[in-house]
Image: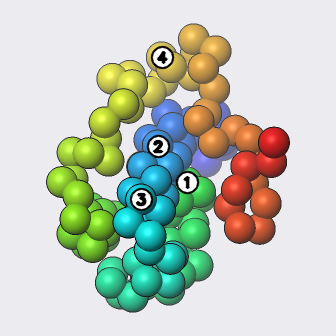
């Protein structure tokens, strides 16, 4: 599958990852602590937060519980039509290159 064919999905994946990272940091949790609470390795949390890996519904539910956050909060601010957001020139939310820790270069 080409990156263009997956672009709308990538917008959603990146948005969810950003919301997870933001909430985890608000709670002062490490990726390892979140991973332990969800039954995955911290590398998987890194991939979720960067939008590199898609999150299964069951895993998102576990993450939401671990972060004491209602599931709909992760979708807040997501464009109604991610494909239109890309065609309007908005691009992908995680278009900035990330360092090894998942931080955007500035």
Mark 1 or mark 3, earlier in chain: 3
Q: Which residue is mark 4?
A: 84
Residues at discs 1 and 2 in contact (Cβ within 8 Å)? yes
Mark 1 or mark 2, earlier in chain: 2
Cα–Cα gap, marks 3 and 2: 17 Å
Cα–Cα gap, marks 1 and 2: 8 Å
Q: Dot 2 lies on which element?
A: helix
Q: Dot 4 lies on which element?
A: helix
Residue at the image position 23 percent from the left and 58 percent from the top: 69
Cα–Cα gap, marks 3 and 4: 31 Å
Q: Can the viewer see residue 5 in this picture?
A: no
Residues at discs 2 and 4 in contact (Cβ within 8 Å)? no
4 vs 1, front mark: 1
44 left or right, relative to 33: right
Label 3 environment density (alpha carbons within 10 Å; few <14, some 14–19, many ≥20): few
Q: Which residue is mark 1?
A: 51
Residue at the image position 57 percent from the left and 69 percent from the top: 46
19 left or right, relative to 59: right
Q: Which mark is residue 18?
A: none
């Amino acid at each position: 599958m080409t990156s263009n064919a997956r672009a709308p999905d990538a917008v959603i994946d990146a948005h969810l990852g950003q919301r997870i990272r933001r909430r985890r940091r608000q709670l002062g949790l490490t990726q390892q602590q979140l991973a332990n609470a969800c039954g995955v390795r911290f590398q998987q949390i890194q991939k979720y937060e960067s939008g590199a890996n898609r999150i299964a519904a069951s895993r998102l539910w576990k993450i939401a519980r671990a972060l004491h956050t209602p599931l709909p909060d992760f979708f807040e601010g997501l464009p109604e039509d991610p494909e239109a957001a890309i065609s309007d020139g908005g691009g992908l939310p995680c278009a900035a290159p990330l360092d090894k820790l998942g931080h955007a270069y500035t």
